[in-house]
Image (spheres, rainbow, N blue to C red):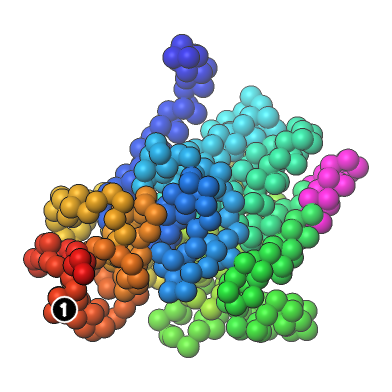
Amino acid sequence: MFRRLISRFRSEPFLWSALAIAALVYILISFVNHYCFRTYTLDLGAYTNALYDYAHFGFNDSSTFKAVPENLLADHFDLYLPLVSPLVYLFGTYTLLVVQLIAVLVGAIGIYRYFDYRFPNTHLKRFALIYFLLFFGIFAAFSFDYHSNVVATMLVPWLLLAFAKRKFRQIVVLTILILIAKENMSLWVVFIGFGLCYTYFRDKQLRYMALGISGFSMLYFVMITGVVMPALSNSGTYPHFHYSVLGTGAGEALMQLLSHPIDSFKLLFINHSPFPENNGVKAEFWIVTAVCGLFCLIRKPIYLFMLIPIFAQKLFHDNSAMWGINQHYAIELAPLLAIGTFEAIAQFHNQQWKRVALFTAVICSLACAIRVMDNTVAYAEKARIRIYKEAHYNREFPIDEAYKVLRLIPENAVVSAQSAFVPHLAVRESVYQFPIIRNATYILLSPVENPYPLTAETFTHKKDSLLNTSAWKIVTKNNTFILLKKQQP
């Protein structure tokens, strides 16, 4: 086994060296954030608690963050969590971060293999790999917890490679794996299928395969969002239609897009919220996308067509946090812009201009990644991503002391805690984001930590009420931590 690994490294040292360096950088972002309590109930805490339930052959009821319990699949129809749940016994609270890291590296290998197959004996694969590993959306995603759409996105290069190789079974398997990640992935696959139909239109078998993928994905999307998730939810509706600028539901949104296409198109570029501080957020996203996808835009616009549902779900959204270049909301751009950009460069006949274009693309990708780390129009907690700053490795409270307090809580105890502590307490049957208490026997608070979802005033009031009641015994209390234990009746 060890000899085989050495042999592979010797045969492709550039690939494995690049992946090793990238993995180290990603770990310094993601794993350090978790160690420093910069991951939160939403989403790592809630999903890690779901892993525990799935690993014990049960459903998760979202009680970690919802006042009224509800099947977690009603919130997002994510089947990756039960599939990877056994890994929680190996990696504990870091499980999903490990899965996300491996997925991105697998996606990078997919980019490399795609160009190695399509354009053998060229340097395209190396430049495409570096472009992809530097892509701003990947850095932003690693800075913000875990999301299954990141994992699913990393299968897209392999899907496109399967089409190029005419591997029909692989196409089917990869399509299904992408669909089951999250309900909105299926709408994206509809457009990927149409794009592949255009790309391989002259190949009858691939053309019909691509159309079949689009049709099946649309059916899956309608069934999951229109039937399955409403049936699982308490309200009987799909919970994530947050596009009031288009209407009150999917039907009204479709009519708005069809009947007012120009007005709808303008919404992709303007601040449609009532808050002036959101001015420029969309413009920044489009500028960064244009810089990264310049060659794709000019010579391979079909890959931008495949991103239409991604642009729509970002930029029509009620929450302005979705609009920008932060968090995980641009991860889907990574594989398609990488493939589109370097396929476009491959068409250059002049070798000198091709060489210039290759370096330009990589430099643009790096520049946009630096933009995400250094300064953005939309607010972002820069300590999450600036691995070159001391603040990334520190917290508002002593980290070592925080772990000492966590060790005072029994492994099987039911706990209510502030958001930053929930992911570290999630591998148990029940953990709640404060102020949800229910049947908790321990409460962990930090007066210096963000009181979300409460206001500072409400948090202080609830904290003082708990300290002044005889129902809770003080285990630890200082300026940074308060640990309470429920008194026995």
State which quarter of the image contains the C terminus. Answer: bottom left
Q: From what the image shows, is residue 124 above or below residue 143?
A: above
**For the residue labelled by badge 1, is the local secondary structure a helix, a strand or a loop?**
loop
Left or right, 319 with respect to 337, comes to left
Residue 297: % across, % down: 65, 57
Of all residues, the one furthest to the top in this rendering is 3
Residue at the spot x=62%, y=31% of the render?
113
Q: From what the image shows, is residue 179 above or below residue 254?
A: above
Of all residues, the one furthest to the bottom in this rendering is 274
Part of the protein shown in magenta? 197-215
**Amino acid on which disc 1 is placed:** Thr
Q: From what the image shows, is residue 229 above or below residue 365?
A: below
Residue at the spot x=54%, y=37% of the render?
106
Residue 58: % across, % down: 52, 52
Q: Which residue is mark 1?
A: 469
Visible residue check, residue 21: yes
Left or right, 387 with respect to 315, comes to left
Nearer-the-camera pick, 418 or 367: 418
Residue at the spot x=35%, y=70% of the render?
438
What is the chief secondary structure element of the magenta stretch?
Answer: helix
Quadrant position of residue 277: bottom left
Residue 63: % across, % down: 44, 66
Residue 402: % across, % down: 18, 55
Quadrant position of residue 154: top right
Residue 202 magenta-drawn? Answer: yes
Q: From what the image shows, is residue 469 above or below residue 310?
A: below
Visible residue check, residue 257: no
Nearer-the-camera pick, 256 or 238: 238
Residue 24 magenta-drawn? Answer: no
Residue at the spot x=51%, y=43% of the render?
84
